[in-house]
Amino acid sequence: MPLTFNLLAPWGHTPERASSYLIELLPAFTGAARQLLFEHSPGRGNPKYTGDYTAFAALIRYLDGQGRNGFVAFEIKYSESMREPMPELKPRHAELSEASGLFTDPAAAALRTNPLAQFWRETLLAQSMIDNGLYDEGYLVTIAPALNYHVQDAAEVYQAHLREPEDGKVRFVNLTLEDVIETIRLSDSGHAEALHHRYCDFWLVDGALQLNAPTFGQALPRTRQRRKPVNAG
């Protein structure tokens, strides 16, 4: 969540700038951002949606060029492996998967297990928001560092389970954190530089490793004194 706040909080203060970022990053996006929400769900546990407690890390509400309501939901990862413990799946997930029209095989076992299950549940939540009339269109966007191959590989595999995007269906988009930062740099170099330094400047790690390299592999100094032999005489 710190990365989510640091990355997106400024977008909530400058909706026009947020809109320009989304136009650069998302295919076919022409909307105007209106509101930023963190840790958002339309109704945790509500059976109208997924009936569980899934929530998006953040969500931006927007209006498109025709005045239709849309959303961009974000799932932001940094060091996660996509193997974290899963919540219990419910029959509602299977119902939504079948009805959504989003998947080449809505009953695929791979969608229900790590590393794809979270993407699947969040996609179902996003589509249920459209199907229940809260929005006319939407995006589910994952953001993770390019070097986090766990997330990048999972996103690539997950996209292979999706049908081609259609009107009225949520679009899944995977972005690297580096590409998002470079998009921010186009209009806010200070924010971009702070993000890069905090989350992507791995030279800081390399420097620390080189500085301490001479001590790696050496035995720890022995601090425990030898016991004196017992005097048997």
Image (tube, rainbow, N blue to C red):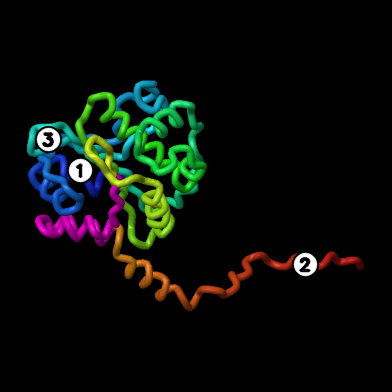
Question: Would you name the residue on which mark 3 appears?
Answer: 63
Residue 67 position (above or below residue 205): above
For the residues labelled 1 and 3, the Cα–Cα distance comes to 19 Å
The kind of secondary structure the magenta stretch mainly shows is helix
Residue 176 position (above or below residue 6): below
Residue 50 image-quadrant placement: top left
Question: Looking at the image, which residue sits at the far right?
Answer: 233
Is label 1 in a helix, a strand or a loop? helix
Residue 54 image-quadrant placement: top left
Question: Would you name the residue on which mark 1 appears?
Answer: 9
Q: What percent of the width, then of the height, locates residue 197? A: 26, 61
Q: Which mark is residue 228?
A: 2
Lateral position of residue 33 relative to residue 212, left or right:
left
Q: Which residues are magenta?
A: 172-198
Mark 2 surroundings within 10 Å by alpha-carbon count, few (fewer than 14), some (14 through 19), many (20 or more): few
Mark 1: which amino acid?
A: Ala
Image quadrant containing the C terminus: bottom right
Q: What percent of the width, then of the height, locates residue 139? A: 25, 41
Is label 3 in a helix, a strand or a loop? strand
Q: Which mark is residue 18?
A: none
Nearest the viewer among 144 and 213 is 144
Question: Residue placed at 62% from the left, 66% from the top?
Answer: 223
Residue 184 image-quadrant placement: bottom left
Q: What percent of the width, then of the height, locates residue 38? A: 26, 36
